[in-house]
Image: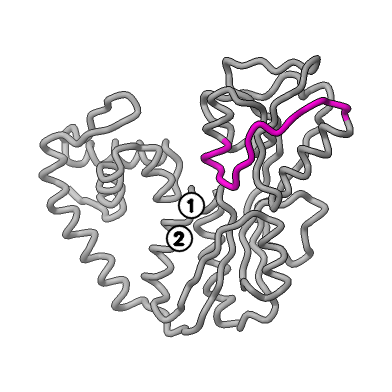
């Protein structure tokens, strides 16, 4: 029997976080990939390791025993990697990133980056797209990771993945166009807000802003609660949300690209470490 390190890491993370979905986000994997790794691990040890309770998971007694070894093995593996594969690169990188990416993919990236490049001081600023663009132009940040509409892309941007903007509402809600539509939107520094306001105005839709928030979780939560509609990435549509049916009368698909933008003044040595790592962790 062979126990691979990454399967043990997956088990440990899933148990620590209590959810396969949350563990998948932390590990930058899909939930199905996490389930597959855990299933393979169960097959190898010949024991049931995870018990499901709704969306939550709990370790079996066998898993609790295995985790005692897993913590030692994973820790030893990571220390060995740091000892023999650390980069000699030194310097400072200021990274700007939007809230939606910071809340889903950032933690795993930061943990790996610090392990692999201990000589590089990484500083992070979380803001909306327009603020990040201004900071990038002012050289306040060296690198930006954000979603942008096509007309805002630059030739040197590195594409991570593409999505489209849709109008979303809570599944149990109804917002007809014959009365003012409550709009849930991001802060003024978000390009999605500007796009939403422009679409409603061009279509002659009467609306009012029912909530404005810089936080993705804030916008998602209040839309699910039935407080209004919002313009959001299709990939961020929650299980209790659906596309706003009335938007089909005036909305045309808007492509959005998640990109990595690196300042030309960043030293080549730092560019060579940040770009591959961002691409590895922020590409689905």
- Residue 110 lies, with reference to residue 185, above or below; the image says below
Residue indicated by mark 2: 109
Q: Position of residue 92 (x, y in %)?
A: 51, 80
Choose top left, top right, bottom left or bottom right for residue 85: bottom left
Query: 282 and 200: which one is in front?
Result: 200
Range of magenta residues: 203-219
Asked whether 206 falls inside the magenta stretch, the response is yes
| Residue plotted at (65% across, 39% down) | 233
Choose top left, top right, bottom left or bottom right for residue 63: top left
Residues at marks 1 and 2 touching, judged by CB atoms closer than 8 Å: yes
Tell me: 133 left or right of 118.
right
Q: Position of residue 276 (x, y in %)?
A: 55, 67
Q: Position of residue 168 (x, y in %)?
A: 65, 28
Q: Position of residue 202 (x, y in %)?
A: 89, 33
Tell me: 129 left or right of 119.
right
- Residue 231 lies, with reference to residue 188, above or below; the image says above
Tell me: 277 left or right of 188.
left
Asked whether 179 falls inside the magenta stretch, the response is no
Query: 88 and 111: which one is in front?
Result: 111
Query: 68 and 195: which one is in front?
Result: 195
Query: 209 and 4: which one is in front?
Result: 209
How crowded pointer 2 is (Cα within 10 Å; few <14, some 14-19, many 20+) is rated as many
Tell me: 101 left or right of 67.
right
How crowded pointer 1 is (Cα within 10 Å; few <14, some 14-19, many 20+) is rated as many
| Residue plotted at (68% across, 46% down) | 162
Residue indicated by mark 1: 105
Helix, strand or loop under label 1: loop
Helix, strand or loop under label 2: helix
Disc 1/disc 2 C-alpha distance (Å): 7 Å
Number of numbered discs visible in the structure rendering? 2
């Amino acid at each position: 029997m062979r126990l691979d390190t990454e399967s043990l890491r997956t088990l440990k993370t899933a148990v620590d976080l209590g959810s396969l979905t949350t563990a998948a986000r932390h590990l930058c994997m899909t939930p199905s990939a996490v389930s597959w790794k855990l299933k393979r691990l169960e097959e190898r040890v010949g024991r049931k390791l995870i018990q499901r309770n709704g969306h939550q998971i709990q370790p079996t007694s066998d898993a609790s025993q295995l985790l005692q070894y897993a913590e030692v093995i994973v820790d030893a593996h990571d220390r060995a990697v740091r000892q023999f594969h650390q980069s000699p690169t030194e310097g400072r990188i200021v990274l700007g990133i939007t809230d939606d990416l910071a809340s889903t993919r950032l933690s795993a990236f930061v943990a790996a980056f610090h392990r692999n490049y201990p000589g590089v001081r990484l500083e992070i600023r979380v803001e909306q797209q327009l603020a990040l663009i201004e900071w990038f132009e002012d050289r306040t940040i060296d690198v930006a990771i954000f979603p942008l509409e096509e007309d805002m892309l630059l030739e040197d941007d590195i594409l991570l993945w593409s999505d489209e903007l849709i109008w979303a509402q809570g599944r149990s809600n109804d917002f007809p166009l014959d009365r003012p539509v409550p709009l849930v939107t991001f802060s003024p520094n978000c390009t999605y807000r500007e796009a939403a306001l422009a679409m409603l105005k061009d279509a002659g839709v009467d609306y009012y802003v029912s909530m404005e928030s810089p936080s993705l979780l804030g916008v998602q939560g209040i839309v699910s609660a039935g407080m209004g509609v919002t313009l959001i990435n299709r990939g961020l549509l929650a299980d209790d949300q659906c596309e706003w049916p009335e938007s089909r009368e005036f909305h045309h698909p808007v492509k959005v690209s998640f990109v990595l933008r690196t300042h030309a003044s960043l030293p080549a040595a730092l560019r060579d470490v940040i770009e591959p790592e961002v691409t590895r962790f922020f590409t689905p």
